[in-house]
Amino acid sequence: MDIRELARHLGLSIGTVSRALNDRKDVSPVTRQRVVEAAAKHGYIPNQSGRTLRSGRTGTVGFMLTLEHDSAIHGDPFFMALLEGLQNGLSERDLDLVVLLARKGEDALTFLRRHVSRGTVDGWVLSGTQYDDPRIPFLLDRNIPFVALGRSAIDRDYAWIDLDFEGVMADAMTLLTKAGHRRIGLVAPPATINNSHIVVERYRYALTRAGIPFDAALIHHGETDESDGEATASELMALADRPTALLLMGETAPVGAYRALRRLGLEPGRDVAVIGLRDNPACRALSPDLTCFSLELGDLGLALARGLVAMLPGHSPAAGPSVQTLWSMSLRLGQSHLTQDRGSAVVPSM
Amino acid sequence: MDIRELARHLGLSIGTVSRALNDRKDVSPVTRQRVVEAAAKHGYIPNQSGRTLRSGRTGTVGFMLTLEHDSAIHGDPFFMALLEGLQNGLSERDLDLVVLLARKGEDALTFLRRHVSRGTVDGWVLSGTQYDDPRIPFLLDRNIPFVALGRSAIDRDYAWIDLDFEGVMADAMTLLTKAGHRRIGLVAPPATINNSHIVVERYRYALTRAGIPFDAALIHHGETDESDGEATASELMALADRPTALLLMGETAPVGAYRALRRLGLEPGRDVAVIGLRDNPACRALSPDLTCFSLELGDLGLALARGLVAMLPGHSPAAGPSVQTLWSMSLRLGQSHLTQDRGSAVVPSM
DNA sequence: GCGACGGCCGTAAACGTTTACGGTTTTCGC
DNA sequence: GCGAAAACCGTAAACGTTTACGGCCGTCGC
């Protein structure tokens, strides 16, 4: 079903049909009505290639899925909720989300370059943001609309929404220090992940404020999956002056940590305090309940979509300042942050 | 960077440049070489819309993500591995994977219809296959290449790969019956999911073979998330003649089941045998280790991709029979399938 | 009643590619 | 050396849209 064929059926020119379907001026209401009805009746849907070729717009937004460098979002089982929120936000403006993966061994930048010059999408949602992420200047220089899920250390103006790990760390650290902990182990992803950087920085800051000396041996960077969480926890617990609390940034790291502790005859939430920085279903299975921080990924997706849509040409009134938001996460108290022998201040005033 | 511009740089016609880049005959090796080098040097990458508009091929394959009807795959944290495998398989033929989501409230069929007439992709990977899935006849009638992840009850010839729940159920049931269990609770998704259908059917078959009477009260259809797993397990345990073993099909259902059992003062793997039909990270967090069935999702993705690629025009030697594969899963023994008082045959010969 | 203007519509030129079709040159057998 | 065939390349017509432009009416102010 062509636009030509549809026009023929209507006794109109294809130009008029196109204008009618695209809600332009220069077409009478009655004609528009006729066209829309005929299109629906014949099941006409414009071919995207023709459309894109002429107008330069694809009507889609790309979500770049990087598999290698896991971030706080990727591999997350709640991931679907994020995508759903994104699609919902984009649907408001008749856009579609397409999730794209890099090819095997393909660099993130060449992946982006490829899709940009192919003209796959109108804008991008970046995730897995690195500490110094080359994708950001790349897109900025070509002024291609994008919003980053996660900040980078790049000192230029761009749109981002990031999880508020500053706030999370502040909460977590007061929770622990007020409970009397002075040796707090920290497990975080590689420092190339920007949030890992931030978490460590806030960790040190909180220690300073609490008057607790910093010990580099208590920090471990690495993969944050289950087995690594287990290994790391064992390692930290093997220290001469071992930590009384563990702060874990990975997805399934707490699962491994529980396992490691129990192997050493230590019970989480009694002998050692454990706090996860990010909620996730795997952790829901833990007993005692893991104290961690959670967020509404659906809403986050919606916010990302709206932030991006505002940058797309023809969609916004004017180019206001880019959205730059710290997305706050809420503390969900379980029992794992408790310890038996530290007495009174187990539930601090926050 | 145009193909026109590139041709001008080379002193060739655009036709020749196009042929050179598309590896056609009718172009001398030396010219081809020159063109390829010049393209690389200038960073020329063909515009996809122009290409698609003319040739009708997009070079992409769509993965349809249905959020509403959760299947055994969706919401799976290992999901990424599947996508990665798919992309890897497609990369072998220079294709790209695009993951598409239905819009809010959009029917699966209208979603498909929309993308098909827009010409978004060359072929489809369907998942979340329903017992009677309208997408399959839709695509068959328009002979659009696709491969379904999961069978449907539709009696036509098409390509599919499905998890071998027949095999899984056979293994699980012999494991339990040989250990002496005669009342086995079953938790499965709604019967509209094809695999749920199959599981129930095999459940009855296994009972018959073992000479155990069937009791409909032991089967529960519903959502298979954590809270539902918990509710269902409680319900089953409240039966007058309560089950001594639980078979759970959902993702996080075992997590809820553990919780429910413990609330009743029953310990999984001691008082009640628990088996999960499908591995998943949330279950890895369980203690005692959950006995369940696992698979390599990356390989599955690869197989799907290859099956689909063979159907794409110009890619295969000839249209052989469609791939129809039962993907076997391997039993991973934990301790949860054991029970204390049933004595000897805890590890059956299999 | 006349000019100007605005509402509506048709015309045709793009957008960037692929590919059927010829045309030129080279190769090759004799 | 000659004809035919093969190898190579240029030409131009698509593919399905959007959109600038211009033309035709009818309306309105005077």
Image: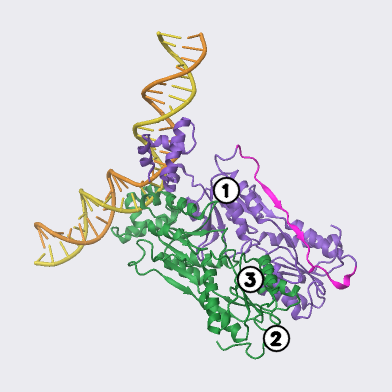
Chain colours: A purple, B green, C yellow, D orange
* Observer able to see residue B47: no
Q: Amino acid at mark 2?
A: Gln
Q: Nearer the viewer, mark 2 or mark 3?
A: 2
The residue carrying mark 1 is: A90
3D distance between C-alphas at marks 2 and 3: 26 Å
Q: Nearer the viewer, residue B296 or A179?
A: B296
> Can marks 1 and 3 be said to lie on one chain?
no
Q: On screen, B115 above or below B193?
A: above
Q: Specify the amino acid type for callout 3.
A: Pro
Q: Which mark is residue B284?
A: none
User: Which residue is nearer to you in this view: B315 or B285?
Assistant: B285
Relative height, residue B333 to residue A109 (above, below): below
Q: Main secondary structure of the magenta part?
A: loop
Q: Which residue is mark 3?
A: B281
Q: Chain of mark 2?
A: B
In this view, the residue in front, D13 or D9, is D13
Q: CA distance from mark 1 to mark 3?
A: 31 Å
Q: Which residues are magenta?
A: A317-343
Q: Determine which residue is flagged by label 2.
A: B340
Residue A261: name its quadrant: bottom right
Whether callout 2 and callout 3 share a subunit is answered yes
Query: Regarding mark 2 in the picture, which secondary structure is present there?
Result: helix
Residue drawn 61% across the image and 62% down it: A74
Q: Quadrant of the C terminus of chain A?
A: bottom right
Q: Position of residue A250 (x, y in %)?
A: 68, 66
Describe residue A144's horizontal placement relative to residue D24 as left or right: right
Amino acid carrying label 1: it is Leu
Q: What chain does badge 3 belong to?
A: B
How packed is label 2: few (under 14 Cα within 10 Å), some, or many (20 or more)? few
